């Protein structure tokens, strides 16, 4: 698993008010800020200052940049929830804004999330078959199709990026139907 998904677990725990007797919120907030903003010795995030500078993980700095950018967007949304629950509204908004950085790697023509270099150039797979390769070097723990729908914290915006609910639903159908036909499917691959 990539990203700092402990953020999501903590957010879920706190939003359900199951944390009062178990967690020191001061320590939780400090830990979340550190993981999201500074380089750690055993960090689950790629160089946070660089991520913050570009508002995506540049492919020329980490080959799993698309997967990481999408994961960090979800993680930042979760951190925003924790900050909001703690009454830190301005800080929560900062993380909610960061959670929208998934848009920075969305290719509007191909309707896929693709890596982007530090120069801003986008590196989508060049052929339809490349989108199907489960171990494509541009993604980790999935392929372009898996990550195409990975915006669990803002599905309405993802649907908008696809151009509306009708096309989004058609593409989801394609993903589910074609995954049965792909001969090397060990995980759903259209």
Image (cartoon, rainbow, N blue to C red):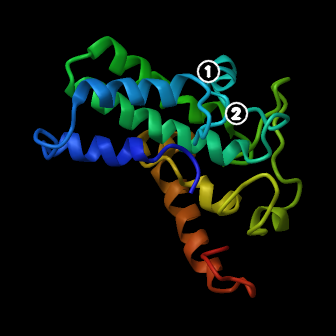
Q: Earlier in the sequence, mark 1 or mark 2?
A: 1
Q: Is residue 157 left or right of residue 56?
A: left
Residue 116: quarter of image: top right
Q: Position of residue 82 (x, y in %)?
A: 29, 31
Residue 127 drawn above or below residue 188: above
Q: CA distance from mark 1 to mark 2?
A: 9 Å
Q: Is residue 86 left or right of residue 43?
A: left
Instruction: Tell me the quarter of the image containing the N terminus.
Output: bottom right
Please report the residue visible at 66 percent of the width from the left and 63 percent of the height from the top: 142
**Which residue is most to the front?**
41
Residue 35 drawn above or below residue 150: above
Q: Which residue is mark 2?
A: 57
Q: Which mark is residue 52?
A: 1
Front in this rendered view, residue 114 or 163: 114
Please report the residue visible at 80 percent of the width from the left and 61 percent of the height from the top: 136
Q: Position of residue 130 (x, y in %)?
A: 83, 63
Instruction: Tell me the quarter of the image containing the C terminus.
Output: bottom right
Q: Position of residue 164 (x, y in %)?
A: 49, 46
SS class, disc 1: helix
Q: Is residue 153 visible in this depiction of the protein?
A: no
Q: Is residue 59 left or right of residue 88?
A: right
Residue 15: quarter of image: top left
SS class, disc 2: loop
Please rate how many residues cluster around mark 1, counting C-alpha atoms within 10 Å: few if below 14, some from 14 to 19, many from 20: some
Residue 147 drawn above or below residue 94: below
Q: Is residue 121 left or right of residue 36?
A: right
């Amino acid at each position: 698993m990539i990203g700092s998904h402990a953020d999501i677990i903590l957010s879920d725990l706190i939003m359900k008010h199951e944390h009062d007797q178990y967690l020191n919120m001061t320590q939780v907030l400090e830990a979340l800020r550190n993981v999201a903003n500074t380089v750690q010795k055993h960090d689950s995030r790629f160089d946070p200052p660089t991520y913050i500078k570009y508002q995506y993980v540049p492919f020329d700095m980490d080959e799993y940049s698309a997967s990481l950018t999408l994961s960090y967007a979800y993680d930042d949304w979760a951190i925003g929830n924790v900050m909001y629950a703690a009454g830190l509204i301005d800080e929560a908004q900062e993380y909610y804004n960061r959670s929208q950085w998934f848009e920075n790697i969305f290719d509007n023509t191909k309707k896929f999330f693709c890596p982007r270099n530090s120069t801003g150039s986008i590196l989508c797979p060049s052929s339809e078959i490349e989108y199907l390769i489960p171990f494509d070097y541009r993604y980790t723990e999935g392929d372009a199709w898996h990550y195409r729908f990975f915006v669990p914290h803002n599905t309405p915006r993802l649907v908008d990026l696809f151009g509306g609910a009708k096309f989004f639903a058609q593409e989801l159908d394609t993903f589910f139907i074609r995954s049965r036909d792909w001969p090397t499917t060990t995980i759903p691959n259209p």
